[in-house]
Amino acid sequence: MIKEFKDFLMKGNLLEVAVGLILALAFKTVVDRLVDSILTPIVAAIGGQPDFASLTIYVGDGQVRYGRFLDALIAFVIIGFVLFLIVKAYNRMVEMSRRKGETEETQEDSAEVILLREIRDELARRPV
């Protein structure tokens, strides 16, 4: 059982996942700062308040703080949109890279195809 655990820990995929997690946490900090420092103040300026945490409804003796939920919801939508834009840009770069690679392969393939056709034609001209 210890050997299996050691094998599990030593696999490359676990290291890749750990690096991905660390980068994701660092990226989360950047996105949080973007939302907290830049985007939320813009939304708050439109709404007339720095945040919506003060919005409440009193129900009997209890207090429903729906403003905090609105803050979280706005942050979620903004973060989702920013990530959407990042993923969209990444996919566009990957697609451009793939197309460039296909173009290079097509040009190389066409030279090979021409050479193979010449060989085929030469072999066809030879008597059997």
Image (spheres, rainbow, N blue to C red):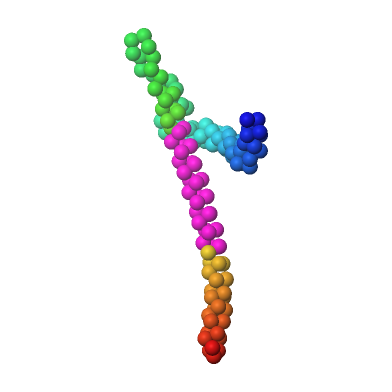
Q: Position of residue 45 (x, y in %)?
A: 45, 32
Q: Nearer the viewer, residue 58 or 16?
A: 16
Q: Main secondary structure of the magenta part?
A: helix
Q: Position of residue 6 (x, y in %)?
A: 66, 34
User: What residue sits 55% from the left and 58% below the top?
Assistant: 97
Taking the magenta stretch, the answer to whether it contains residue 89 is: yes
Q: Nearer the viewer, residue 7 or 67?
A: 7
Taking the magenta stretch, the answer to whether it contains residue 88 is: yes
Quick check: can you spot residue 118?
no
Query: Given the current orientation, which residue lies at the most extreme front position?
Result: 128
25 up-or-down from 59: above or below: below
- Quadrant placement of the C terminus: bottom right
117 up-or-down from 83: above or below: below
User: What residue sits 54% from the left and 75% below the top?
Assistant: 113
Where does the magenta region start and end?
Answer: 75-101
Query: Given the current orientation, which residue lies at the most extreme top position?
Result: 61
User: What residue sits 37% from the left and 11% below the top?
Assistant: 62
How many labels were placed on the picture? Answer: 0
Q: Position of residue 88 (x, y in %)?
A: 48, 49
Task: Please identify the quarter of the rendering in which residue 67 is found.
Answer: top left
Relative to 103, is 5 on the left or the right?
right
Q: Nearer the viewer, residue 4 or 66?
A: 4
Q: Position of residue 24 (x, y in %)?
A: 57, 37
Task: Please identify the quarter of the rendering in which residue 47 is found.
Answer: top left
- Quadrant placement of the N terminus: top right
23 up-or-down from 102: above or below: above
